[in-house]
Amino acid sequence: MKKLLLASSLVTLLFLVASGLSENVFVSWKGYQKEYSLLLAGRAKDPERKREARNVPIELHQVVVPDLAVFDRCVTCHRGMDNPLMAGAPNPFRPHPGDILNVHPTERFGCTICHRGQGAAVNFREAKAVDAYWDYPLLPRELLESSCGICHDPKAMAKTGAPVLAEGARLFEEKGCHGCHRLGGLGGSLGAALDSAGLRTRHQLTMANLPGEKTTFRWLDLHFKDPQGIVAGSLMKPDYPTDEEARALTVFMLSLQADRELPDRAVARDRHRLLSVGHDQGERDGRTLYDRLCRVCHGEGTLGIFDKHLGKFVPAIRNPAFLASVDRRFLRANILAGRPGTLMAGFEGGLTGPDLERLLDFLAGGAALPERRAQAAAKRPAGDARRGAAMFARQCAGCHDPGEKGQVAPTLSSRAFQENAGDAMILATIAGGRPGTAMVAFSGPGGAGLSDAELSDLLAHIRSLATRRK
């Protein structure tokens, strides 16, 4: 046992010595600095410069910027990042590409404010920090423009160094992402708010189906290309973007860091304007609002749509027959409250009052849509809900399914519908139908179709659905 103890102690001692040597003597950064000195000496123009290059001390270098919470040792290895003599040298000795350091000097901004990664590390694996021990690993080169959006307005960067970022901001609006996601105070509530999407860590995302490295930027890229493949059951419609579009959207998402506190000196003027007015600068007209909030699901809104991918019915909200039977109060309530149980999430808090009224004006198509439509005086006897239920099962349940979940046609038991749809509107829709949609007319000239009594029975049954809400 004594011999075993002695042997194990010697082995432990050897491991400790080897560990100490690897951490303090045989470290990669010292080798890089020695190689840098030789390269610099070889490129120096006069003997004095050559001698200075050879005598550069081998030591750690770091940049500390307290107001940005930056503590970076990247310059320990990247010694030539601001030295034009090292042009054409291999990494990590070559100068920083472009002229970005002229306006963003390292001593004022550090490195990780743009590149992310673990700044205190002095070897590449730990600096890259893809493993689970670091929240924000090193960004790939093709995603670096996202960091420009931290201090600048993404839309203002199209011609000033970050065209991919500006394209991502444009695609976000063009593809109707505001319809489900709120950003800068505008948008729906079906998806997560995105004001600080760029600060999310891998632990906040579903990584089980993500192949390869588990990083937020790879998750974003693949989620744009295949939402359901990355998050099973995701309601995000697959848009099948190109690789370039997915990359631009990923860059824009990474730039969204509203919760990050920055000193005023680091925030550009265009960013200050953005923060004061939101991501959608300037007054928005009804057409613009419709395109950003509604088009992704409703299309032009004049024809009813069945989304085969999601298996959901999307009503025609700009159909003339529909607009002839509703009022502004009904439309406003549906936009703000949404339709629970459907993909129509409410926009309460995601639309300003003036924006909502401009959107209502556009939906009305220039017509004088009344604030509250006068209801015709009831001239029919009260209907029988039991007879109406049997008729509903025969005539209506094929589209308005018995569960009232709105799978094929709109749900009739939702609070927004029951509280804001008047009896006259419901009766007119049943009788006259909705041209351009699957809703046919159930009453016609000369008494064809349903009688007044049968219409009353159906109305009574539809009103009884309000008590079945869960």
Image (tube, rainbow, N blue to C red):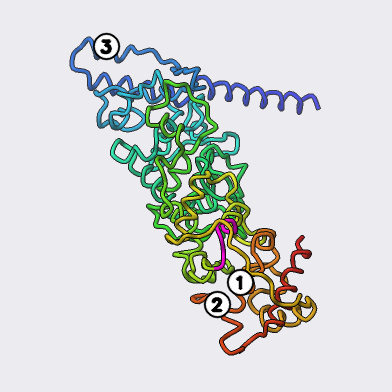
Residue ID for mark 1 = 409
Q: Is residue 3 magenta?
A: no
Tell which circle, 2 or 3, labels the residue nearer the N-terminal end.
Answer: 3
The residue at 25%/29% (across/down) is: 87
Q: Nearer the viewer, mark 3 or mark 1?
A: 1
Residue ID for mark 2 = 438
Measured Cα–Cα span from mark 3 to mark 1: 83 Å
Drawn side of residue 258 relative to residue 427, left or right: left
Mark 2 vs 1: CB contact within 8 A: yes
The residue at 54%/52% (across/down) is: 180
Marking on residue 51: 3
Instruction: Give the crowd class for mark 2: few <14, some 14-19, many >=20 residues within 10 Å.
Output: some
The residue furthest left is 45
Q: Position of residue 137 (x, y in %)?
A: 51, 36
Q: In which image quadrant can residue 155 be found?
A: top left
Instruction: Give the crowd class for mark 3: few <14, some 14-19, many >=20 residues within 10 Å.
Output: few
The residue at 28%/22% (across/down) is: 83
Mark 3 vs 1: CB contact within 8 A: no
In the image, residue 56 above or below residue 182: above
Q: Position of residue 301 (x, y in %)?
A: 47, 65
Q: Is residue 329 magenta?
A: yes
Residues in magenta, as a range: 325-331
- Numbered disc 1: secondary structure: loop
Q: Nearer the viewer, mark 2 or mark 3?
A: 2
Dot 3 amino acid type: Arg
Drawn side of residue 193 relative to residue 171, left or right: right
